[in-house]
Image: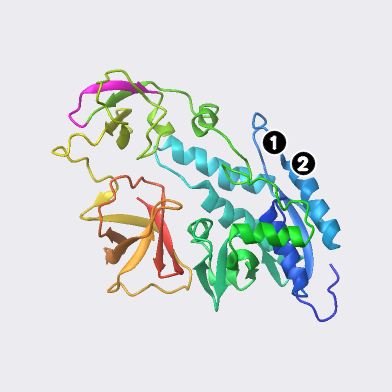
């Protein structure tokens, strides 16, 4: 595409939501040469699909801002790298994070490649994160910070990225979008899988992984209920399985262990403190990580205390790092009994997202 004289060209990933809409508006105001791009991804035919409506919303915003609009079909990449990955992980009894993979393979993979080939200097997304001198920082809005999902990014990718809304809170974003007269200013947020929308995960997985009835055990090994298959559940989950042997004073049970070979779930109601649940994912006092990525390209100082989380929006917890036989081990000050294989652990130094890895 032709470049406007003297202006840096930026392709904005337009989802049809308020965040990406304001991203485009802010960049145009900052005098970038802005192009809106709607990314089409693969979706199962049984999922209620809103992509056509979202695309229309993205087109309306581009028309309001008087910027070009492009379509980008990444269905094949999404099916292989995001969806198939997710199903394969569940089949192995692991807990995948498709949103992390979607960012890695789609937004900062296929989309970035497309933009650079078309002559763009940068891509922009509506992520609530900040970028300062090659460092990825948490977004100002603690409730919306999305750095957890971007731990796989590298300097090679980040040098072509801008994140305009990381400096704002969600209410400020909506207020600014209204000032720009954007039709998406009050549009509800999408929930659920990246680009797929709101789905019941268990019902979703049943379409691809057949049910396999198994027992629910308490911490003493007694059968107290049943479930539909260990691959449908994650550690810490408090619903989706049936407790058949109930007491009047029972509290809610939550999953503390999955035995994939025996197809059993072990649960706790926190009423038996003398029976400690096993430390899932913990080996030799720490959690082993694979697929480790440091955003700066350099390993952090292992003699320093850091912060980390194993789930999105989980409070940041103190930890330290060590290397053992060429593998990275993370030790939390407070034992994490619901750390599941396949989950992402993301590590921080204050507001700086250093990177992360996948729990083995």
Residue named by callout 1: 49
Q: Which secondary structure lies at badge 2?
A: helix
Mark 2 nearby-residue class (10 Å; few <14, some 14–19, many ≥20):
few
Residue occupying the point 67% across, 31% down: 45
Question: Residue shown at 65%/28% (left/top)?
Answer: 46
Q: Position of residue 280 (x, y in %)?
A: 28, 45
Q: How is the image coloured?
A: rainbow
Q: Which residues are magenta?
A: 219-227
**Marks 1,2: beta carbons within 8 A:** yes
- The N terminus appears in which quarter of the rendering? bottom right
Q: Does residue 223 show up magenta in the picture?
A: yes
- Which residue shows up at 78% across the image and 56% down it? 182
Front residue (pair 62, 70): 62
Instruction: Give percent across and percent down for residue 217.
Output: 26, 27
Q: Is residue 112 visible?
A: yes
Within-10-Å neighbours for mark 1: few <14, some 14–19, many 20+ = some
């Amino acid at each position: 595409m032709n470049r406007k004289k003297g202006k840096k060209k930026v392709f904005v990933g337009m989802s049809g939501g308020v965040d990406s809409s304001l991203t485009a508006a802010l960049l145009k105001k900052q005098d970038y040469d802005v192009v809106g791009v709607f990314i089409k991804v693969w979706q199962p035919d049984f999922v209620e699909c809103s992509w056509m409506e979202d695309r229309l919303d993205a087109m309306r915003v581009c028309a309001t801002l008087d910027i070009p609009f492009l379509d980008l079909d990444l269905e094949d990449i999404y099916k292989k790298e995001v969806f198939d990955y997710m199903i394969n992980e569940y089949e192995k009894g692991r807990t995948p994070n498709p949103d992390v993979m979607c960012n890695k393979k789609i937004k900062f993979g296929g989309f970035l490649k497309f933009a650079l080939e078309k002559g763009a200097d940068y891509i922009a997304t509506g992520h609530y994160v900040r970028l300062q001198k090659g460092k990825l920082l948490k977004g100002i809005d603690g409730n919306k910070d999305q750095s957890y999902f971007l731990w796989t990014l590298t300097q090679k990718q980040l040098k072509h990225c801008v994140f305009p809304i990381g400096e704002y809170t969600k209410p400020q974003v909506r207020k600014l979008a209204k000032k720009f007269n954007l039709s998406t200013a009050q549009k509800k947020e999408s929930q659920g899988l990246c680009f797929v929308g709101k789905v019941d995960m268990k019902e979703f997985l049943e379409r691809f992984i057949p049910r396999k009835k198994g027992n629910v055990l308490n911490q003493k090994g007694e059968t107290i209920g049943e479930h539909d298959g260990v691959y449908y559940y994650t550690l810490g989950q408090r619903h989706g399985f049936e407790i058949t042997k109930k007491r009047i004073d029972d509290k809610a049970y939550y999953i503390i262990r999955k035995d994939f070979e025996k197809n059993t779930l072990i649960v706790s109601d926190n009423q038996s403190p003398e029976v400690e649940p096993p430390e899932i994912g913990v080996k030799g006092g720490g959690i082993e990580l694979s697929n480790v990525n440091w955003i700066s390209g350099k390993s952090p100082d292992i003699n320093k205390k850091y912060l980390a989380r194993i789930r999105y929006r989980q409070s940041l917890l103190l930890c330290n790092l060590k290397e053992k036989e060429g593998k990275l081990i993370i030790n939390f000050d407070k034992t994490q009994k619901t750390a599941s294989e396949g989950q992402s652990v993301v590590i921080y130094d204050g507001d700086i997202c250093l990177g992360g890895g996948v729990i083995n």
